[in-house]
Amino acid sequence: MRAGWVSDDGALVGDTVAHELVDRSVGTVVDTIVGAVRAVAGGRPFEAVGVGVPGFVVAQTVVASPNFPEWDHVPLGASLSEALGAPVTIENDANAATWGAWVAAGRWGDLVMLTLGTGVGGGVVSEGRLLRGRRGSAAELGHIPVGGDRPCLCGGVGCLEVWCSTVGLVAEARRRGIVVADGRGLIDRVEAGDAVARAVVAEAGEALGRGLVAVANVFAPDRIVLAGGLAAARPFLEPHALPALRTRAVVSSRGAELVWFPRAEPFAVPGAAMVAASRAGS
Ligand SMILES: [Zn+2]
């Protein structure tokens, strides 16, 4: 878990600080967040606290989370507000990162973000609003089916996450006889010219292209942000993904700008804070 101090213009002041969760019980998570907020504030007064949570969030409640499988409708926002004596806003982590990317881009245009890491997260800002849905599970862009019959942890088949997450890529590489520890290991093999590794990543690029066409056609974004560890594979993904977006998406959407960042975290912490700030000010 990372915490940071964010000024009211959305800029991160100083570095973020990592905190280890010793276990995943609600009590431990609340105590860890409270300790992190107090440490980062260092006695300074703050207007609001924003928390990005991996999971479905409705009305300041974590309905369910893949990272916290025991959690069921946990009122995290209320617990934290009470413990901190300040307004606390919780938001899905990919949504928070998306909002952070939109604020960083000058709050202009419609923006879609895909986080390409161990899984694939997604977020959408359309007409200045973060798309959440009444159930808190809108913009689960990692679970757009893009082909193939490989099962996904969500219960679906052929999800973008199966193709374009490090976990999915490493599993597919293994099936083809390439044993690597992680996404970086696979990219190293691709850079070294390994033909099978190149084929695995090229197919991921094709799948990414189908995903980009889907998000372009549904949301008509001005900009699509791709962020996370797999951005390191951009030279091998983009040549397969970009032509699909440029030729197969509907005409008015195929020109969407594609932007890559090596990490989503630099957007996630300011994004969570800015979601909280906009709620505190509304
Ligand atoms: Zn899925």
Image: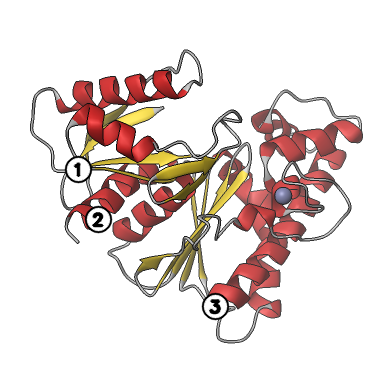
**Rendered-image quadrant of the N terminus:** top left
Q: Position of residue 225 (x, y in %)?
A: 49, 58
Which badge, 1 or 3, comes first in the chain's sequence? 1
Per the image, the residue denoted by label 3 is 255
Q: Mark 3 or 2, which is nearer the eye?
A: 2
Q: Secondary structure at mark 2?
A: helix
Identify residue type, mark 2: Arg
| Residue farthest toward the top in the current orientation of the protein | 22
Tell me the crowding category of disc 3: few under 14, some 14 to 19, or many 20 or more residues within 10 angstroms, Cα based: some
Q: Is residue 18 visible?
A: no
User: Relative to the observer, which residue lies in front, 78 or 173?
Assistant: 78
Query: In the image, is the residue at mark 2 within 8 Å of ligand 1 by its beta carbon?
Result: no
Give the image's coloring scheme.
Answer: secondary structure
Asked whether, in this view, residue 30 is left or right of residue 149, the answer is left
Asked whether, in this view, residue 115 is left or right of residue 147, the answer is left
Per the image, the residue denoted by label 2 is 279
Per the image, the residue denoted by label 1 is 48
Q: Position of residue 127 (x, y in %)?
A: 38, 75
Which badge, 3 or 2, comes first in the chain's sequence? 3
| Residue farthest toward the left in the current orientation of the protein | 44
Asked whether, in this view, residue 170 is left or right of residue 116, the answer is right
Query: In the image, is the residue at mark 1 within 8 Å of ligand 1 by its beta carbon?
Result: no
Where residue 213 sits, quadrant-wise, is bottom right
